Image (cartoon, coloured by chain):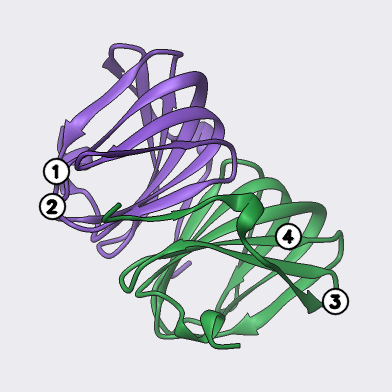
Chain colours: A purple, B green
Amino acid sequence: MNANVAIRSEQKLQDLGGGVNRRVLAYNKDLMTVEVIFEKGAEGSTHTHPHTQCTYVLCGKFEYSVEDETVVLGAGDSIVVPPNLPHGTVCLEAGTLIDTFTPMRDDFINE
Amino acid sequence: MNANVAIRSEQKLQDLGGGVNRRVLAYNKDLMTVEVIFEKGAEGSTHTHPHTQCTYVLCGKFEYSVEDETVVLGAGDSIVVPPNLPHGTVCLEAGTLIDTFTPMRDDFINE
């Protein structure tokens, strides 16, 4: 098939430490979708990258910060973060984020 | 905030007919996330567009076709479709797809 399929049960779960696990899902060079699973209280510490990112909250509740502003997001809520803006999250209720990046994150594949 | 937030409950649901409803979620010019809700048996008829697309299955079961090949996707499964490739879906069990496009779909905003 001239498309890239990811069956979830076949994708490797990576333990990032601190109560955060990541599973890379379908991707090509232009787009990558990633599942990130948080325990309550776990953090995605503030960071930047040159990719545009959309975060979709699959379940749980998250305090999401971009630069010096914060919003609380729950299931079904979403946010698009432009390139190179500092952003991070604190998990208020255990849950999962679906992060999509353009272009793909080479660093997630080569770790 | 220098990021685009979409609180799901505030986003308009569009009835596309044929048992398909769409809710545009967060987007900027480079990335757009869209929720598409299907009744059982509803179809996303085969079409093309110049955007790269990732489809993530939130729930339900879908027969997904790209050109002349087909795969069945369930909750958590995903697929990335390159630009201009004919693709479509038939909903086997009622459910929801999270579609992400790069660049954004102007046509979804201007309808």
> How would you rate the neighbour count of disc 4 (Cα within 10 Å): few for under 14, some for 14-19, many for 20 or more?
many
* Subunit that carries the residue with mark 2: A
SS of the residue under disc 3: loop
Find disc 2 in the rendering and name its residue. Answer: A84
| Amino acid type, callout 3 | Gly
Q: Position of residue B51 (x, y in %)?
A: 40, 78
Mark 3 or mark 4, which has the lower sequence index?
A: 3
Q: CA distance from mark 2 to mark 3?
A: 41 Å
Tally the numbered discs. 4
> In this view of the protein, can residue A3 be seen by the observer?
no
Chain to which the residue tagged by mark 3 belongs: B
| Distance CA(mark 1)–CA(mark 2) | 5 Å
Q: Nearer the viewer, mark 2 or mark 4?
A: 2
Q: Residue at x 29, y 11 (%)?
A: A18
Residue placed under numbered mark 4 in the picture: B37
**Label 1: which residue?**
A48
Q: Is residue B11 above or below residue B73?
A: below
Q: Are marks 1 and 3 on the same chain?
A: no
Evaluate whether label 3 is on the same chain as label 4: yes
Q: Amino acid at mark 4?
A: Ile
Disc 1 from disc 3: Cα separation: 42 Å
The residue under label 1 is which amino acid type? Thr
